[in-house]
Amino acid sequence: MIKNSFFCGVIVAGVVSVLIAGCANTGKSSAGVDDAAVNDTAVRAALVGSFRETASAKLDRLNQTELQVACTDSSRTGKPLDEKVRDALQGKALAAVKYPADGTYLGDWKRGEAIAQSGRGLQFSDAAGTAAGGNCYACHQIDKKEIAHGNIGPTLAGYGKLRGNSEPILKYTWARIWNSHAFNACANMPRFGDAGILTEAQIKDVMALLLDPQSPVNQ
Amino acid sequence: MKSRNWFATITAACLSLPMALNVVAQQDAQKEIERYRQLLADGNPAELLEMRGEDLWKQKRGPKNASLEACDLGLGAGKIANANAVLPRYFADVDRVMDLESRIVHCQITLQGFTREELTKRPHSLTVAERQTDHEALTAYAVGLSRGAAVNLPQAHPKERESFLRGEKMFFFKGGPYDFSCATCHSVDGQRIRLQDLPNFQKPDNAQRAFTTWPAYRVSQGAMRTMQWRLYDCFRQQRFPELAFLSQASVDLITYMGVKAKDGKMDSPAIKR
């Protein structure tokens, strides 16, 4: 009996592996698994079943945008985006940038510093409607007096001193904060304006931190 | 010509001096943090929690008035030592892959008669003032008995392989309003958030150090935190919805990290800032 069921098991396993080899030319197979079967649909289903909504963070956050799908694949495979895809994504992002309605780009650098220091907002534990910070120091050096800065993004020390604040610089910097994907499709930096993380007034304050000649960043 | 070179050298030196000073300040800060970590390691409060966990493990508790001593963590009933070094793994009795925390809850249900609902309601303590949960104590005890064991997750069962493959895809999954994935912070060398070094899971030594030192006592929180909590808190910062305790994604990501950390030596509960 045991021998029989073992024998059957071997036959079944053999048939299954022939089937796998036959119908899926994709992906390698280890532990008898067709690796390609663990596809994006399967992963998405597992993710949706693994998260719970809170007042401020709904499950729709797992619905990937076109850009998120493309950049997920690129980062997992290590292959850069196809140039056409990249240019299309960047073009779309740049076209959607909303510049300040009143034409004023610079707010108050002191408030900008507070926004750059704050990591609050949009977390599942936050009350809905919590004002977000920019958390800029998490990734960037900005005012050199703050030594607790990250290094995922480039240094922004002396940002305005090095570049001045001509119209093109103001517009470029605004667009970069609004949606950095306009310049680098798979950039790590969040879309502070596009995703509604910071308000227009807050972005003006962060702009002032970077570009106001009085800001400690430019001393 | 000569004097020009000299001028260029001085100019370059002057220009790079502030940068150099800044690098020195940062290296000093890093050194101080390293020293702080070493000082902390002398007395890890998690040891008290391991002792409480051992008591709880051996006590007869729950509707069935039984201890957890017969719990099978994957090496056979009652064999706790070194079990976490081979977890997550496939368990035939439930036909799925489980990590240490899932398996402890499973044993509390099957051996002691607790309900899943009561065990999963609030597995992690919330505030510094609060006593650590039973789940945290039991996990501290069990994982402590794997110290020194080499990480070696089995990958021969199809469900173990599938868990790894899903975990890998989840690791790179960008989503939410910040477009972050685990890989955003954990797949490049030498990256920091503020002053916190971030392990690069594509490098075996980085993956080993990270995997083998969770669970850990978090000084800043005054509490020992489990691996499932670590992932839960990563997703909070990633701006995802709330990761459910014992969820498929939790187990799959732990599998992915564990496979990447092969041959690392378990050293947990550790102590961290």
Image: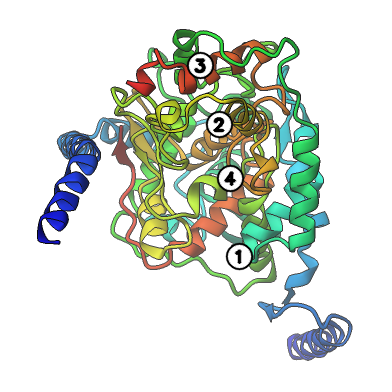
Looking at the rendered structure, whether the residues under marks 2 and 1 are on a common chain is answered as no
What residue lies at 16% left-to-right and 57% top-to-bottom? B5
Quarter of the image for the C terminus of chain B: give it: top left
The mark found on residue A208 in the picture is 3
Quadrant of the image occupied by residue B177: top right
The residues tagged by marks 4 and 1 sit, at their Cα atoms, a distance apart of: 33 Å
Spot occupied by residue A20 in the image (x, y as percentages of width and height): 83, 82
The mark found on residue A78 in the picture is 1
SS label for mark 4? helix
What residue lies at 64% left-to-right and 47% top-to-bottom? A184
Q: Identify residue type, mark 1.
A: Gly
The mark found on residue B237 in the picture is 2
| First in sequence: mark 4 vs mark 2 | 4
SS label for mark 1? loop
Seen as rendered, the residue at the extreme front is B1
Residue carrying label 4: B102
Letter of the chain that mark 3 sits on in the rendering: A
